[in-house]
Image (cartoon, helix red, strand yellow):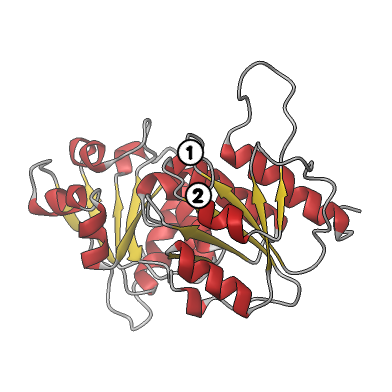
């Protein structure tokens, strides 16, 4: 193992016991208030860490378990993270399996600074396409929408009245690390509406009660596609303030499309109208 950029050797801390205070500290970060207090985001998985580091994130601590790492070439990540100033901590298999939040862990986990989530830090291009998620509860849905946003080049994803925070480990996992590649923010509904109006971004609300299919309205200018929680849908605040209401037609007997799927359909319709699918 090579040394740091300043020439000092990398000396990983070794933790054998699953009851070690470091292990307990990681477990505490499963709680939102502890993550926010520490200002960190917990990232598990080699692929997710690669995405985070490629986006410019600098890990504070990197935890790894040699017994779980199937590909030895992945160990190069130790030099990379150590060169960024990260503390390296080797965990025994029992210790790592205790802190892992995914089934079949691959032996990689890190603490990184929380991604910025202020509306004011978002910089929008001309005619931006923004995705707004109101009160979406399931981390898997938020993560899936982030993956769609990354794939589609969406300018930003905003959580209005966010129930789940962007630092939730399951959001990071479901997004495959896209929380580091897509600008995100969170605020109350009134603040988000004011922010959109100030930037002349039209509000397009998705609701099954709309009479207009999602392929009809003009989605080529500055547009915010707004989706709501699956059980309740969008609140009256969004529906009343919307410049357009649209629906995704469904012809089956059950409510088959979840919020992430609906968001993806509308986002890609916007791309089609903008001529970006050619």
In the displayed structure, 261 sits above or below 121; it is above
Residue at the spot of label 1: 232
Q: Residue at image x 43%, y 58%?
A: 77
Q: Which mark is residue 235?
A: 2
Give SS at disc 2. loop
Taking 270 as reference, is 43 left or right? left
In the displayed structure, 90 sits above or below 207; it is below
Q: Is residue 175 visible?
A: no
Position in image of residue 204 (x %, y %): 68, 56
Q: Residue at image x 70%, y 50%?
A: 245
Position in image of residue 70 (x %, y %): 43, 37
- Tell me whether circle 2 and circle 1 mark residues in contact (CB < 8 Å): yes
Q: How crowded is the residue under tag 2: few (<14 C-alpha within 10 Å), some, or many (20+)?
A: some
Residue closest to the far top: 253
Taking 263 as reference, is 78 left or right? left
Q: How crowded is the residue under tag 1: few (<14 C-alpha within 10 Å), some, or many (20+)?
A: few
């Amino acid at each position: 193992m090579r040394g740091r950029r300043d020439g000092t050797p990398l000396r990983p801390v070794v933790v054998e016991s699953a009851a070690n205070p470091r292990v307990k500290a990681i477990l505490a970060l499963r709680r939102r208030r502890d993550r926010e207090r520490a200002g960190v985001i917990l990232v598990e998985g080699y692929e997710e860490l690669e995405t985070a580091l490629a986006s410019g994130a600098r890990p504070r601590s990197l935890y790894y378990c040699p017994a779980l790492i199937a590909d030895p070439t992945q160990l190069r990540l130790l030099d990379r993270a150590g060169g960024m100033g990260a503390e390296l901590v080797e965990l025994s298999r029992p210790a790592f399996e205790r802190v892992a939040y995914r089934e079949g862990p691959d032996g990689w986990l890190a603490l990184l600074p929380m991604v910025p989530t202020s509306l004011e830090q978002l910089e929008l291009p001309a005619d931006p396409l923004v995705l707004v998620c109101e009160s979406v509860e399931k981390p898997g849905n938020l993560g899936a929408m982030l993956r769609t946003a990354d794939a589609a080049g969406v300018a930003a994803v905003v959580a209005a009245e966010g129930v789940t925070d962007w630092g939730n480990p399951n959001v990071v996992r479901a997004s495959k690390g896209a929380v580091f590649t897509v600008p995100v923010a969170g605020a109350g509904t009134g603040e988000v509406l004011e922010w959109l109006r100030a930037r002349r971004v039209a509000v397009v609300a998705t609701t099954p009660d709309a009479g207009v299919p999602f392929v009809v309205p003009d989605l080529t200018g500055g547009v915010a596609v707004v989706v709501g929680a699956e059980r309740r849908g969008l609140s009256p605040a969004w529906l009343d303030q919307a410049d357009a209401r649209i629906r995704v037609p469904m012809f089956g007997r059950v409510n088959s499309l979840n919020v992430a799927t609906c968001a993806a359909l509308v986002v890609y319709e916007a791309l089609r109208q903008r001529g970006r699918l050619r």
